[in-house]
Image: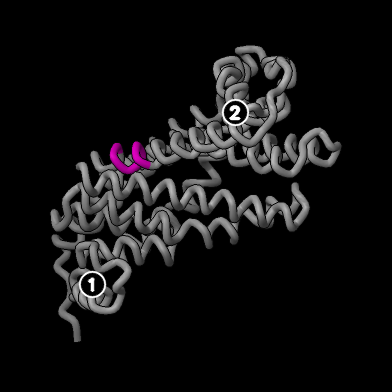
Amino acid sequence: MPAPLDPHMLWNGLGWPLIRLTFFISLGLMVGNFIESLNWTRSVAKLAEPLIRTARLKDISGASFSLAFFSGVAANTMLAEAYERGELNRRELVFSNLFNSLPTYFLHLPTVFFITAPFIAEAAFAYVGLTAFAALLRTAFIVLLGRVMLPPLPEGCVVCLLGDEEQPANRWRTALKKTWQRFKKRLPKIMYITAPIYAGFFLLKQYGAIDWIEGFMAEHVSLLAWLEPQALSIVAFHMVGEFTAGLAAAGALISDGGLSTQQIVIALLAGNVLSSPMRAMRHQFPYYAGIFPAGMALRLIVYNQTLRVLSVMLVAVGYAVFS
């Protein structure tokens, strides 16, 4: 029978870290959601127009790109309607959707960073920075591909398709309202995952189960043999749980001082690559199929995830070699 845990150890190893983590996650969610809720679409459209023209995308694609900084659903709906009207052909639709991966990423970047930072501290800058760089690489590739494969287009007005800009007073009031609504929805979900994972990881660590899991995975998972044995548990939690599950595991290992920042970041990137495609099918396909025809929805998800996995793998290899 396992020995009872010391109350002092429970407080220092589990109670206080969870309280501190909950506070910083709450603060981060408020800040991140508020930044997400501010609509700077028209300003971004003006800045993005030269890039859109370089990629030889149509005005409707450029407007969708700019709108994606505010709402991915609205951006994809705009593309789907243009495709149904015949304003975009299949290739243009695919390129436009892939092109939107950059604003879609940056739409959630503040929240991702402010959730990640409390778990893995300074490693969050490396992890988020590398995934952002991967998004930039994807965009550069699509711009180059569009330049080669799409015909030149006449000049147009991207900003004209975005409608009137909301007045500053209404914009701030709306942003505050959306921030609170999203906070109430997201925090319980995150803590519902985080608290049990963090507590479970603490208990498994105390009773030696983590050491057994690390040894088993190191012996049987040849694909990830290049990772440190402790880092394999981060990948495992990332794959079987949500994003915060991998972060919780990484945070616990950082607290122990068992892994370096580089090892933590590479493990999280590996978990990202392995978990994202199936998670995208679970969460994205129903929403995509409601906007695009089912066959096109599946095709867009496959293209997006393939490009995403390749770009993250590329930056992971670069980080492992040069860091």
Determine which quarter of the picture holds residue 233: bottom left
Q: Which residues are magenta?
A: 125-130
Q: Which residue is mark 1?
A: 214
Q: Provide residue 186's location: percent of width, then percent of height.
A: 51, 46
| 149 in the magenta segment | no
In the picture shown, does residue 214 fall above or below 127?
below
| Dot 1 amino acid type | Glu
Residue 260 position within the rendered picture, expressed as x and y whole percent measured from the top left: 16, 51
Q: Position of residue 114 (x, y in %)?
A: 38, 38
What is the magenta segment's predominant secondary structure?
Answer: helix
Q: Under tag 1, what secondary structure?
A: helix
Residue placed furthest toward the right: 85
Most foreground residue, 68 or 47: 47
User: Could you classify mark 1 by the number of other residues whose Cα lies within 10 Å: few (under 14), some (14-19), or many (20 or more)?
Assistant: some
In this rendering, the count of numbered labels is 2
Numbered circle sitting on residue 55 = 2
Horizontal placement of 145 versus 162: left or right?
left
Q: Secondary structure at mark 2?
A: loop
